[in-house]
Image: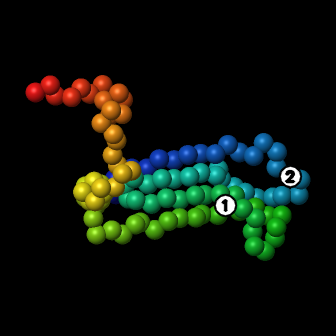
Amino acid sequence: MGKSRKHIVVNFADVRHLREGLTGGNGPDRLTIGLCPDVTELHLTTNTTEDPFTLEQSRFATEPRHSELDAYSEVLAAILDGESMLSARGDAAEECGGLRPDPG
């Protein structure tokens, strides 16, 4: 049995009208966002380098990000470093989450 994979796949709609003279382009265009392993792929219909009227499926991919810290450690490090993108003002948190200050 293979490794477990978790990912999100976004399939794009086919082109409604393929311009006359263009051939090829098999397969749907799609974006795959890998959660485990951490990878992003874009499969996109493009022109070939040899013939601009021939379409092919091109694949663009990112390499997994290498970090000394895992995701949870990065969040904790950002909080300890005072990163404002990961915080909310007290009044905003109370309003959004229905939190009430401890009366004691």
- 64 in relation to 91, above or below: below
The residue at 33%/39% (across/down) is 89
Local packing at callout 1 (Cα closer than 10 Å; few below 14, some 14-19, many 20+) is some
- 47 in relation to 8, above or below: below
The residue at 89%/53% (across/down) is 20
- 10 in relation to 1, above or below: above
Whether residues under marks 2 and 1 lie with C-beta atoms below 8 angstroms apart, the answer is: no
Residue that label 1 marks: 57
- Residue 27, given in percent of the width and then of the height, sits at 65, 53
Q: Earlier in the sequence, mark 2 or mark 1?
A: 2
Q: Residue furthest left?
A: 104
- Residue at disc 1, secondary structure: strand
| Residue 98 visible, this angle | yes
Q: Which mark is residue 19?
A: 2
- Residue 28, given in percent of the width and then of the height, sits at 65, 50
Q: Residue furthest right?
A: 20
What's the amino acid at mark 1? Gln
The residue at 33%/68% (across/down) is 67
- Residue 32, given in percent of the width and then of the height, sits at 51, 53
Q: 1 or 36, which is in the foreground? A: 36
- 52 in relation to 31, above or below: below
